[in-house]
Image: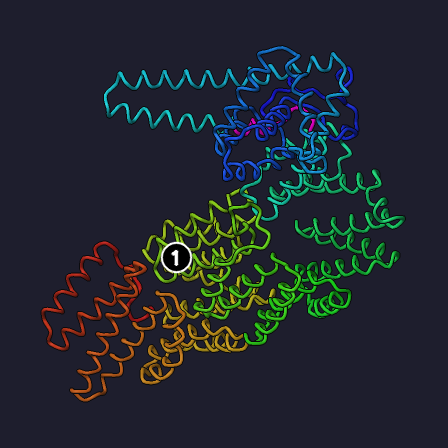
Amino acid sequence: MASVHDSLYFNPMMTNGVVHANVFGIKDWVTPYKISVLVLLSEMTKNTEITVVEERRLNKHILPLLQGPDMSLSKLIKIVNDCCPNVASSVQIRIKLMAEGELKDMELFFYELSDSFSGTEPDVHKTSVVGLFLRHMILAYNKLSFSQVYKLYTSLQNYFQCDKAKTTSKTENEEAEMELANTEEDEEEQELSEEREMEKEDLDCPIGEEELACNGPLSQKQAEYFLSHQASLLKNDESKALSPVLLQTELNNLLKFNPDFAEAHYLSYLNSLRVQDVFSSTHSLLHYFDRLILTGAESKSNGDEGYGRSLRYAALNLAALHCRFGHYHQAELALQEAIRIAQESSDHVCLQHCLSWLYILKSRKGEDSSVLLEHSVKKAVHFGLPYLASLGIQSLVQQRAFAGKTADKLMDALKDSDLLHWKHSLSELIDISTAQKTAIWRLYGQSTMALQQAQMLLSMNSLESVNVNVQQNNTESFAVVLCHLAELHAEQGCFAAASEILKHLKERFPPNSQHAKLWMLFDQKIQFDRAMNDGKYHITESLVTGITALNSVEGLYRKAIVLKAQNQTAEAHKILQVLLTHCQKVKNIEMVIRVLLSLAELYWRSSCHPVALPVLLQALALSREYRLQYLASETVLNLAFSQLMLGIPEQALNILHMAIEPILAHGAVLDKGRAMFLVAKCQVASAASYNPQKKTDALESAILNLNEAKAYFTKVDCKEQIRDILYLQARLYNSLGKIQERNKCAMLFRQIHQELPCHGVSLLIRL
């Protein structure tokens, strides 16, 4: 948190090398960095050439400079120079004269600071933020003994000399590089300069982190500012926060000087959650509540109830922690303890929080908790807890969506919760509600509506943005919406756009952040689909391993898909049966339907079309019961194919009209191609009983549908399907006597067939 060495710090609370436990007894003490800030404030009041725009820029940085941790002189000068070069030059000259002069120069400077408050219109008001800072510094300086003043001046000289040495060495290196570059040829000069820039960047990164390391204690305001700023970043924009290792180092250093600083223990708990460290997070959480009770912070603000309040919320937080890591038995015990203490104290707010976590715990264990959830929402409204009430409504909507309720009722419920959000300015819940709508429309297969909701959230500005120039926070809601957006683009064959979205996700949510698993899973799934379309099954094996690590159910399903494509029917059937039993047990209806469709395809490959019909009818009944429109359309598509294989193409064409419209409106490009390909197959099969003229018209219509299907498959580079279409087109052109078109299709078929040999699956038994 500062680039200054430990020996440069002057700490009035240090006696004979021992730091007192309560370093916050004095709120501020003088350091070389704070002297530099005082010089900056002094020059800002004296400089008459500063413009209004430059003054406004400097004023934006004043508060972070006053409350933030100490930093190196060069970094401070750089910040000032970006705002006003004239003031930066004056500050640098003034510090140089003070550091290279005598002790009386520093004495004179502090004596002149008092003049800022004099006069009828003083430069600084005593009660302003800057005025309070100046008064604290003057008071702290006046309390120093002569030996302490001498040590402070020595540390100021070292502070300036260390920065001067760094600047000098940097300048010499640049000059040496310039001389070396002039002696070489132009091509070599360009290559070496690029290499040197990369090396310089590599060296600068660790130095930047070292500047954050503070070997000395922080003042109370600096510590509070650091903790609140990092906590806000962890909540809203984790990528801007310090890395887990560096943040923990800073917290350990802070706790070394004040072990009873409860807020530092809580931030350590949040930091441990980022890396899923169950031991450290539990340790820090317990220490937080221990310090909170021992210091009496709660008792001061809550009277006699403070002690009991800390105990019951400690048990509640411990229950939440165990629930997060999957320790459901320990979570239940801690939750019972929190409920018992809250009931003894008649704390209805704490009991309401306990009720919410009881619902979460039961739902994680797979138990029916709908009654608990409804009761939780009613109680939250009764006690005037809008945040908990809205979260309960969101959970209730999600539960009803999986239970198959209609979309209009769910959207009405979300509309009511949105009214609560806007009324109470609950920015985080506004984002969650919009992301929830996106996920619901995706579940129901309405990709257009999902895209609209995703774009709506991405176009909104957050009410609680962390940074001044940033309008959106990097929360889970934005990660979910961006992942859906990437998947929607990939489904439409826009893989370049999907890659750009995933690249943006990786920048906003680095791999070590808590929401990185979302884009990692979607990235693996998109790569898997592309590899399957290209017929590169050897690539899919590593992707299946990655998907399984993030989502075991999805990984097992993808493994069965690969085995099915490789004609390992027995192994694929065994995995699908195991997966079907598990999903029926946990009531994962969407995956149940997908597994049933895959089982039906296995039966086709084994020429057991009558056996596939009951499986497909079961999938159709489930998809209609749970309002999964897109899966219902896909099931109808599979039913039509089964009827085609059973020799009733006319019936297959009739039921295709039920599925073709939703698929063309909301479906993926691959499904659109499969639908049009199946329509063409049914037209060709039905044309066998037509008269010659009607048969010719039917075959020409089939060729047009095949061209449309080929265009869809080309978008996703599905070569196997394109090869099948070319084969069928060549046969149709031959039947119509169009020799030139037939030869063209035959030539294209031969080219693709040589690139992609057949895996033994006949055209007739593949949808």
Q: Tell me which colouring the rendered structure shows.
A: rainbow
Q: Quadrant of the C terminus?
A: bottom left
Task: Locate residue 362: give its quadrant.
Answer: bottom right
- Give the class, few, some or many, for how many residues have Cα within 10 Å of label 1's Cα (few <14, many ≥20): some
- Residue 49 drawn at (x, y percent): 50, 31
Task: Locate residue 666: give its quadrant.
Answer: bottom left
- Residue beneath disc 1: 529
- Note whether 432 is above or below 186 in the view shown: below
Residues 152 and 104: in front is 104
Task: Locate residue 570: give its quadrant.
Answer: bottom left
Residue depicted at x 73% and y 27%: 257
Q: Report if residue 571 is visible in the image.
A: no
Residues 696 and 3: in front is 3
Q: Quadrant of the N terminus?
A: top right
Residue range in magenta is 208-218
Main SS of the magenta segment? loop
Residue depicted at x 83% and y 58%: 347
- Note whether 21 is above or below 560 in the view shown: above
Residues 761 and 178: in front is 178
Residue depicted at x 42% and y 52%: 501
583 to the left or right of 648: right
Q: Is residue 217 magenta?
A: yes
Residue depicted at x 29% and y 26%: 191
Helix, strand or loop for disc 1: helix
503 to the left or right of 361: left
Residue type pointed to by label 1? Asp
